[in-house]
Amino acid sequence: MPATQGAVATACYTRRVAETDSELLDRLRGGDALALETLMARYSDRVYRLAYSVTRNEADAEEVMQDVFLTVFRKHDTFEGRSALGSWIYRVTMNAALNRRRGKRTELETALDALLPTFKADGHREGDGDWVLADWSRTPERELLSEESRVAVNRAIDNLPEHYRSVLVLRDVDGLTNEQVAEIMGGSIALVKSRLHRARMALREQLTRHYLGMPA
Amino acid sequence: MTCQEAIAVLDDYLEVILGPDALASLEEHLRDCPPCVAYLNTYRRTREVAAGVNRVAMPEEMKERLRRFLIERLRASAP
């Protein structure tokens, strides 16, 4: 690549990186479709993770992505700027994904209570010594995330109700705060915290069964 | 503090937002309760394993399809 061309490419790249969401929205308002592409590059992986966490299906998640970015393009004027653009896009995604899932849901999600640890009247956990002392935390990463384990983890995640899966993705993968998740999902911070803790506990029970070689 | 009470506050413990009294009670409980230590270790690891499996990116070919889809729609809606 000639030096000048490289410099232009670098300048374009720098502009894309440095441009704020608000500047991109201004370009969108001015009819610049390339701004949408920049927004896509910035948000598509995060939006996809959230869409997939609700739908658990690639084809449905793809249709959600189409809905979301069309909404961003067509309704960006309705974005009032009181919250971050990212939060608005997450909210649009959550609504689109829930709508799609409601239309197609065929399986029955396991009630979360059935997946949580159980306790005796004195507050000790129920189960024999092997169960309550099971500690697979030092298992090497390659075994914890082997193909077989990934299947088991995904099955365990599938068993969680959709709102619990979404909280898990937004908090533990994307690193959002409880406050941000509450704003996106609509609900109190206490509800986000409760769902996150219950989701992790339910997963822990199922992963422990898997790593101990017990039936799911 | 019972095991049930200890497990109920593990998320706050890992977020380092437990108040001093609750923190002291939990740490005292953990000193004498191997099952709760095992629970804490695996709870913490569950968070990492679930994050590792959920850290999916949008497939590249899907991104390309989305880009084409949007360009077509935008062209169709242009005045």
Image: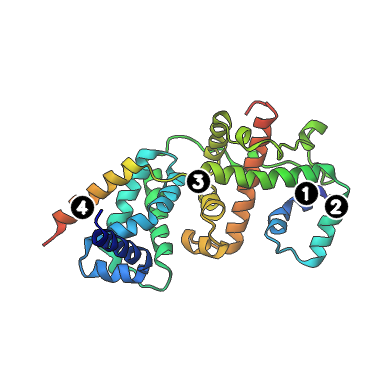
Q: Residue at x 75, y 38 (%)?
A: A135
Q: Closest to the observer: A132 or B74? A: B74
**Residue B21, percent from left and from top:** 82, 65
Could you say whether the residue bearing mark 2 is in a helix, strand or loop? helix
Circle nearer the N terminus (2, 4): 2
Q: Chain of mark 3?
A: B
The Cα atoms of the two marked residues, 3 and 4, are separated by: 28 Å
The Cα atoms of the two marked residues, 2 and 4, are separated by: 60 Å
Circle nearer the N terminus (3, 4): 3
Q: Which residue in the protein does label 1 denote?
A: B4
Image position of A94 with respect to A22: above or below: above
Q: Closest to the observer: A45 or A200? A: A45
Say which of marks 3 and 1 sits in front. Answer: 3
Image position of A58 with respect to A20: above or below: above
Q: Amino acid at mark 1?
A: Gln
Q: Which residue in the protein does label 4 denote?
A: B71
Question: In the displayed structure, does residue A163 sit left or right of residue B28?
Answer: left
Q: Which residue in the protein does label 2 denote?
A: B29
Q: Residue at x 19, y 56 (%)?
A: B74
Q: Amino acid at mark 2?
A: His
The figure's colour scheme reads: rainbow
Q: Amino acid at mark 4?
A: Ile
Same subunit, tags 3 and 1: yes
Image position of A100 with respect to A35: above or below: above
> In the rendered structure, are the residues bearing label 3 and label 1 in contact, judged by CB atoms less than 8 Å apart?
no
Q: Amino acid at mark 3?
A: Arg
- Residue count near mark 2 (Cα–Cα under 10 Å), binned few <14, some 14–19, many ≥20: some
